[in-house]
Image: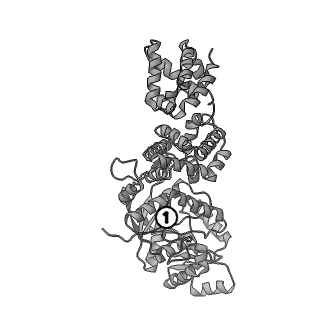
């Protein structure tokens, strides 16, 4: 089926770009690309008190980092410019259409004072009636009354005249048929007293003028859908398809918050998540490709993405799953590509800023330590790229984020790694350890180790095991690992010995010898 799809991502930049807005932008981008359609960026800044230019810049920077591209928008231009609603208002676009609506009798001027509106709300509360403006004297005011009020210079708003005593029905692409009794839908303000259009009016006029085919948005907008549908009908316009996406909740089913791991999207960049893994993860919140696939490439997401796959039930945000997907994405990279990703990650100013500002949390590594190890990694990539690459290759199978590489690789890049005291106490007490260290120092001074692969170190340690009649290799491997890395866990010992090379091994074993009881 060929469909000419046009969708819009239309944020109100008042704060940071969070996960919900990113999913909104991503769903639209995938949908447009799946159908070979257009994806439009529109800035909804009619609420001038809350609008922030820094926030708009953050949205642009974040979407650029994630790699969501637009076919039209304020930063690209296009046939429907301008793309900021404040500029569209200045151009007279909304004023022109409100005249049409007033002429058709589907909108009216209301001169109620704030006191009168307050009184109306109190009466509704006392009588337990639905709250909202259902038409005071002005909905049915005579032309003479309106003219008199205008002549007096009374301030007014322009309201939409919602039809009464009827059913308003929309066909939602996810929820199917949704119906409202029109008597429960209030008459919303379309033009404020200062002449600024409200979201309801500006957004729908723009959607029509920009030929938007699908209004994809969060389900919190479902209650506005009858007003929007009526507006299209009042103008005699074809309605776009409404698509109300489910909310995002934490794994506990509660509204998404910081403690679920939700944060500004740029923080995920700073924590070392790959944009591909983040997109993969975000796409799967409330949508499924219809099979069991989880780790998907961007191309696979585009090919599989369809509105039919969006579920009506809330989508779960599972931080552990994000880490798992990111680990998969790291392992799927070619080591050279991975090294470049790490270098780019470490070059971004926000990475450093993030860890400098992060408060330490119990049970988590100290952000200052994380940053120190990351800067060490950065220096090594700049000064000895080949060595950094070998170290990264060994940790590639074991980490979940780019930030993990700092701590994981630290022992490769410092002269003498910090020692875990528990590990020293446990593995350096065996009497054979002193002989092992002496043997290693002798081996390192022999010529044959200079350019050797893991198999040579493997053979060397097994020779020691045989010479000392040890049943298992453990008493050889563990003290050696602690001596070389300061830790009891890490990549394969023979591989890491091969990367460290004889000179580094000798220096570390020499230090370890001094720690023997």
Disc 1, SS: loop
Q: Is residue 467 above or below residue 396?
A: above
Q: Is residue 35 above or below residue 210?
A: above
Q: Is residue 311 visible?
A: yes
Question: In the image, what residue occupies the spot 64% across and 76% down?
Answer: 193
Rendered-image quadrant of the N terminus: bottom left
Q: Position of residue 461 (x, y in %)?
A: 47, 22
Query: How many numbered marks, from 0 up?
Result: 1
Rendered-image quadrant of the C terminus: top right
Nearer-the-camera pick, 222 or 268? 268
Nearer-the-camera pick, 56 or 383? 383
Structure colour scheme: one colour
Q: Position of residue 297 (x, y in %)?
A: 41, 53
Q: Position of residue 39 (x, y in %)?
A: 46, 67
Q: Is residue 285 above or below residue 323?
A: below
Question: In the image, what residue occupies the spot 53% across and 63% down?
Answer: 130
Question: In the image, what residue occupies the spot 41% across and 64% down?
Answer: 33
Question: In the image, what residue occupies the spot 63% across and 29% down?
Answer: 418
Residue 356 lies in what quarter of the image?
Answer: top right
Residue highlighted by disc 1: 69
Nearer-the-camera pick, 9 or 424? 424
- The 10 Å Cα crowd at callout 1, few under 14, some 14 to 19, many 20 or more, is some
Furthest residue in direction front, as rendered: 447
Furthest residue in direction right, as rendered: 152
Q: Position of 358 compared to 230: left or right?
A: right
Nearer-the-camera pick, 423 or 485? 485
Q: Is residue 175 visible?
A: no
Q: Position of residue 28 (x, y in %)?
A: 45, 63
């Amino acid at each position: 089926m060929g469909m000419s799809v046009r969708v819009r991502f239309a944020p109100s930049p008042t704060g940071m770009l969070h996960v919900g807005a990113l999913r909104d932008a991503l769903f639209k981008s995938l949908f447009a690309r799946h159908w070979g359609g257009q994806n439009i960026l529109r800035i909804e800044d009619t609420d001038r008190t809350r609008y922030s230019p820094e926030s708009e810049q953050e949205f642009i920077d974040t979407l650029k980092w994630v790699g969501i591209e637009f076919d039209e928008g304020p930063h690209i231009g296009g046939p429907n410019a301008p793309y900021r609603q404040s500029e569209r208002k200045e151009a007279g676009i909304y004023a022109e259409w409100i005249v049409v609506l007033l002429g058709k009798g589907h909108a009216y001027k209301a001169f109620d004072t704030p006191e009168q509106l307050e009184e109306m709300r109190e009466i509704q509360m006392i009588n337990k009636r639905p709250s909202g403006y259902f038409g005071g004297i002005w909905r049915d005011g005579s032309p003479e009354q309106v003219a008199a009020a205008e002549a007096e210079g009374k301030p007014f708003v322009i309201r939409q005249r919602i039809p009464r005593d009827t059913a308003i029905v929309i066909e939602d692409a996810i929820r199917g048929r949704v119906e409202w009794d029109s008597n429960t839908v209030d008459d919303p303000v379309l033009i404020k007293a200062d002449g600024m259009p409200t979201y309801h009016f500006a957004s729908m006029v723009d959607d029509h003028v920009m030929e938007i085919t699908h209004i994809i948005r969060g389900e919190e907008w479902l209650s506005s859908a009858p007003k929007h549908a009526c507006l299209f009908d009042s103008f005699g316009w074809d309605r776009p398809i409404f698509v109300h996406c489910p909310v995002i909740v934490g794994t506990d089913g509660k509204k998404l918050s910081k403690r679920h791991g939700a944060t500004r999207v740029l923080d995920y960049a700073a924590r070392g998540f790959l944009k591909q893994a983040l997109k993969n993860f975000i796409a799967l919140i409330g949508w499924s490709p219809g099979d069991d696939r989880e780790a998907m490439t961007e191309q696979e997401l585009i090919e599989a993405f369809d509105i039919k796959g969006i579920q009506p039930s809330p989508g779960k945000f599972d931080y552990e799953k994000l880490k798992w997907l990111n680990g998969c994405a790291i392992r799927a990279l070619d080591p050279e590509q991975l090294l470049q990703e790490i270098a780019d990650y470490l070059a971004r100013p926000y990475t450093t800023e993030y860890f400098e500002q992060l408060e330490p949390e119990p049970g988590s590594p100290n952000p200052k330590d994380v940053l120190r190890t990351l800067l060490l990694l950065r220096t090594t990539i700049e000064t000895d790229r080949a060595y950094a690459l070998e170290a990264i290759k060994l940790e590639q199978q074991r980490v979940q984020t780019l930030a993990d590489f700092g701590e994981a690789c630290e022992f490769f890049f410092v002269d003498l790694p910090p020692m875990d005291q528990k590990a020293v106490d446990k593995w350096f007490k065996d009497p054979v350890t002193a002989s092992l260290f002496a043997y290693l120092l002798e081996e390192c001074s022999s010529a044959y180790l200079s350019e050797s692969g893991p198999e040579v170190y493997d053979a060397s340690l097994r020779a020691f095991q045989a010479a000392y009649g040890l049943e298992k290799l453990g008493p050889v491997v563990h003290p050696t690992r602690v001596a070389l890395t300061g830790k009891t866990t890490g990549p394969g010992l023979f591989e890491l010995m091969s990367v460290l090379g004889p000179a580094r091994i000798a220096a570390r074993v020499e230090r370890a010898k001094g720690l023997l009881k």
